[in-house]
Each structure stands twice: as C-alpha cells, then as structure tokens.
Image (tube, rainbow, N blue to C red):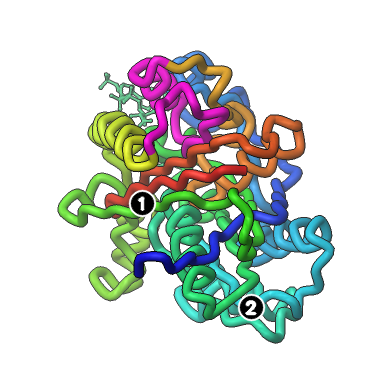
Amino acid sequence: MKGLKLPRSRIIATGSYLPDKILTNRDLEKMLDTSDEWITERTGIKERRIADESQAASDLAYEASKVALDRAGLRPEDIDMIIVATVSGDMPFPSTACFLQAKLGASNAVGFDINAACSGFLYGFCIADSFIKSEMYKRILVVGTEVLSKITDWHDRTTCVLFGDGAGAAILEPTDEDRGILSVHINSDGRMWDLLHIPGGGSRNPTAAETVEKRLHYIKMKGNETFKVAVRTLEDLVLRTLEEQGLKPSQLSLLVLHQANLRIIQATAERLGLPMSKFIVNLYKYGNTSAASIPIALDEALISGRIKNGDYILFEAFGGGLTWSSVLIKW
Ligand code: UT7
C-alpha cells in the first residue's frame, strides 16, 4: 500500500429540516411531574421539535436531503448511494433509505439503513468514506433522521423531556485536495446494551397486547449510568483521534458533539481545556435528536459561517448499543 494515494472524501453540501411544532419545557410541566428548572439545569434543553402525525422519518429525511442536493447543484439521479441512520425508521422494513430513494427519485442509487442509535450518522460517514476511498461509489448522501416523539413514552419523565425530532443530510464526494475526512473511528460494546434500548416490537418481545400494555415499545434509558460512560468515553476518543493525527486539542477550530446533554459537552470541554465557544450547542432548542443531532448541528454551523476552509473539525457521538464514534475533518 506504500506510495498508493487513496482519494479522500469531503462534504460538498449539507441540509437540515426541523418540524414546525415546538414543545417547550413549560408545555411539559402541564403534561407531567417535571419543571423547566429541572430540565434546564440537568440537560440544558429548553424546547424540542415534534413531527406532525402524518410525518415519518423518511419525510423529514427527504426535506433535509432536498436542501443538500439543491446546495450542491445536483439532481437526485447523480447520487450513487444513500445511507440513512435512524432508530425511528418508517417501518421495521424496508429500510428508510429505500423510502427516501423513492421519494427523491434517486434512481441510480443503492440505499440502506444503519442502526447505531446516536452514533449512526458518524457510522454513515465512516462507511461512505470507505466506499469513496475504494472508488466503488462516488457521490454518497448520508442522512440522520429521527421521529423520536413516536417512540417516546410520554408518561416517563426520565426520558420524554430529552428527545426531539429532526433530520440532517450531507453529500460526500472524492477529492484530491489536502482536505476532507482525515480519520474515522467507530466503536461498540454490546455488553452495555441495556443502558439504552427499546425492548418491544422485535423478535425478542414480538408485538402483542401484553408488550403494548407494558409500554415495551418505547425508549428505556438508564440515564445516570449512560451519562458517566459518555463523559469518560468521549474524552478518551477525542484524545486518541487527535494523537493519531499529531494534533493538539487547541488546534481544533470546532467540535461538533452529539447534542444529548449540555453537561456532557461542558465536561468534555473542561477535560480538554477548551473554551465552550469551540463547541456547537443547539440542544437547548432541539433536544436530543439521536442520529439527526450531528448533521443538524453541522448544517447550522455552516450556515452561520462558523466553518472556514482549512479548519480542523472534530465530530463525536455516543449512544445506544453502546456505540461511539468520531470523525476528524479538515474543511
Ligand atoms: O443520546 C444518547 C446518550 N444519552 C445520554 O448521554 C444521556 C445521558 N444522561 C443524562 O443526560 C442524564 O443522566 C439525565 C438528564 C437523563 C438525568 O440527569 P441526572 O442528573 O443523571 O438525574 P438522575 O437520573 O440521577 O435523577 C435525579 C432525580 C431523581 O429523583 P431522586 O431519585 O433523586 O428523588 C429522578 O427521579 O431527578 C428525578 N427526575 C426528574 N425530576 C423532574 C428524573 N427525571 C426528571 C424530570 N423532572 N424530568
């Protein structure tokens, strides 16, 4: 392999979509035993978006993807591959990527889904990067889309105050320039599967009157334990990713972390000795949108002019599985 120069992949355009309906902490106070003060203090979240009754994950993905295609000046037929990361897909099967392909009219693409919870979008980057490097596929649409409001137990205050709906998309292409994806890391540890999962509706606990009655089709999370693993893992991952590239934390222009909890982002900033101004924070308005959180944050960072050519940007996510991932990009 020595001397062989593989193409790098770079993001040529992004897009995002958030449903119009806003559910505030004050609204939640009227629905269950919680308070704006508790939610703000423990998570940083103030409000979240909620999809319409008629909207499924592929509908949100479609809106975000259309924006990315328009900005890239591409037609849907120009896309070779569609990778959708979601835990709230339209149906158990077919894949949400197939629904999205049909909606877009991306007739030359192959589509499939990734199930890696909140890390799914970065897993998507990793897979897209490998296909681009191998020169099997050229133009890849990676989408994170979630309608978590439909798999959230609105009677469980330990989870329902956290989540929101939304979608984000990015289009990747090969480049010969000194930029693009520098490194990708994906990890999982299935021994901790029970920290974050949906027990019902699969082949372990097939849908039955009893599983519905026990509310097994909703997200269950051991929040406090997940929090501790997340802080430890994210710090290790940043340091490992940077060390490999010979970079110091101070050389990063921007960090785009999964938007689960402001305290997790603050703890990472503190441990790396970096100011919060280097971190994207938008969870106060969208909550935790799982696989959609990183691409929505990236899209907002680009639109608001926070990213310049040559910037080193680090993405990190952590979620059910457990899974965790990082991607380092030179813009
Ligand atoms: O996206 C994938 C990865 N996900 C994460 O990384 C999430 C990680 N976890 C977290 O963000 C936090 O653990 C939570 C925000 C979920 C919870 O915060 P916490 O500081 O870990 O609280 P806790 O679970 O230890 O609960 C503290 C107290 C409990 O009461 P007692 O037992 O001390 O009397 C809870 O019953 O807060 C209570 N509580 C609430 N009170 C008001 C839990 N939820 C609520 C609520 N409103 N919504």
Q: Quadrant of residue 10?
A: bottom right
Please, which residue is most extreme toward the bottom here?
107
Quadrant of picture, ligand 1: top left
Q: Residue 74's spot in the image, x, y percent? A: 80, 68
Q: Is residue 218 above or below residue 46?
A: below
Q: Residue 135's spot in the image, x, y percent? A: 53, 76
Quote the CA–CA distance across marks 2 and 1. Answer: 24 Å
> What kind of element bears circle 1?
strand
Q: Nearer the viewer, residue 328 or 205?
A: 328
Q: Is residue 180 left or right of residue 71?
A: left
Amino acid on which the number 2 mark rests in the picture: Asp
Q: Quadrant of residue 242?
A: top left
**Sequence-earlier tag: 2 or 1:** 2
- Label 1 crowd bin: few (<14), some (14–19), many (20+), radius 10 Å: some
The C terminus sits in image quarter: top right
Magenta residue check for 129? no
Q: At x 70% / y 52%, what residue is drawn?
A: 14
In this view of the protein, can residue 223 be seen by the observer?
no
Q: Is residue 325 left or right of residue 6?
A: left
Identify the magenta region: 246-273
- Label 2 crowd bin: few (<14), some (14–19), many (20+), radius 10 Å: some
Q: Which residue is mark 2?
A: 80
Q: Residue 65's spot in the image, x, y percent? A: 71, 61
Q: Residue 13's spot in the image, x, y percent? A: 72, 54
> What kind of element bears circle 2?
loop
The N terminus sits in image quarter: bottom left
Q: At x 48% / y 61%, what residue is drawn?
A: 124
Q: Which residue is mark 1?
A: 185
Magenta residue check for 268? yes
